Image (cartoon, rainbow, N blue to C red):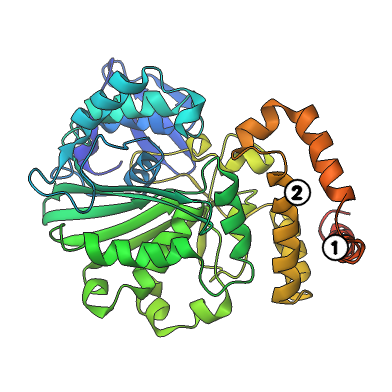
Amino acid sequence: MQDTDTISSYRKKGKIWVGCGRRLWGSDFFAGLNYTCLMSSLLDYLEWRGDLTFLQSPFNPVDNLIMSLLSYFPFDGLVPGPEERGRPFVSLQEAAGRIFEKYGGLPRGAQLIPPQDGPEMLRRAAASRRFGQTGITGYVNHVDPDREVQFCALALSYRTARGPEGYLAFRGTDDTLVGWKEDFYMSFKEAIPAQLEAVAYVQKTARRLRGKLRLGGHSKGGNLAAYGGAFCGARIQRRIAAVYRNDAPGFNLRVLESPGYQAVRNRIHSFIPQTSVVGMLFENDDNYAVVKSRQSGLMQHDAYSWEVGPQDLVRLEKVTTASLFVDRTLKEWLAALEPRQLKEFVDALFQILSSTGVSTWTELSAGWLKNALTMLRSLNTMDRDAKARMEKIIRSFLKAAARNFVRFLP
């Protein structure tokens, strides 16, 4: 059985959860009748474990996932920023109340992933003893199309049995085209603007928080958390207890081999779903844990679909062959291209997308027929040589995909 602090948390409606490998075995606490139930979601975790504070039960990887996803909520103007004086923190309970008062049902435009589970997770977390009184501060949401940067982060403060701790949560890529373009730039740039902002954010926010620090994020946010932890300086690094990369893209070899990254490498915890695509991008340590998702294919990137147990994410032994296929295809394709070729390709691709006049993927898909015709006209007006180079790069990708299809997916 799991440690004794879990029994009061799971005994709801006369039943308890007992950790048992990849499944949870539920039993009637009074009648002794056993039944098997599927692993649960983040929402179930908050229902069953939400009455345990961090003083009663230590921080675990599921808590990391919940805190990292809080960065996707629109706290703009509702919680203190990094420069604000006076009242430094607002409780999650109060901040959630402000969000629902301002946005109501939190529509899709509020940058949630996915919108159907996000509001309920926020409600349950804010109402729980475990997260409700967690302090939030240092909220930043910076999107600058001119500088091609999309960066958002917030800091949380909570008390454990060993004293106060802080979690710095970095948002992944949002719905904006500029955010996705910045992600593509990771394939050939030594550092993108959001990574540099992450370093500055860690250095500035660490001064506001007491005790040990944890850094984490989902998707690009996990990359920013690791980059910020690697280059924030030795003094702050000594305070870092852990860095969490939740299905986050990797780095180039120069970052992985840098002294700063090596200093925190053993404290980085990487989680990817069994058919990960995003988390296999670029170079990684290959030191990752595979978690079980209820979704399939690309939809496994949705962290709300990850299955959880009482104190950990549900883990599997290895990724699928489909994930290995995508990983090898992209790595071979990128290795065959020069940085200038990649930059030209990315710039041309997003120039075509931007010709529609929209700034988000939601807007692009809403008028898909009109936008598709606009993009086709933009492609046809490209310089002949530039168009030929773009087509050559696409063909090289298809060739790499064909080679690996035979290798991994016969």
Give the distance between the C-alpha atoms of the residues marked 1 and 2, in whole angstroms.
Answer: 34 Å
Asked if residue 281 shows in the view, the reply is: no
- Quarter of the image for the N terminus: give it: top left
Residue at horizontal 47%, vertical 22%? 107
In this picture, residue 404 sits left or right of residue 276: right
In this picture, residue 258 sits left or right of residue 276: left
Residue 220, compared with residue 91, is above or below; it is: below
| Disc sitting over residue 168 in the figure | none
Residue at image mark 1:
407
Residue at image mark 2:
352
Q: Amino acid at mark 1?
A: Arg
- Mark count: 2
292 and 245: which one is in front? 245
Q: Position of residue 114 (x, y in %)?
A: 51, 31
Label 1: element kind:
helix
Q: Position of residue 226 (x, y in %)?
A: 41, 65
37 and 156: which one is in front? 156
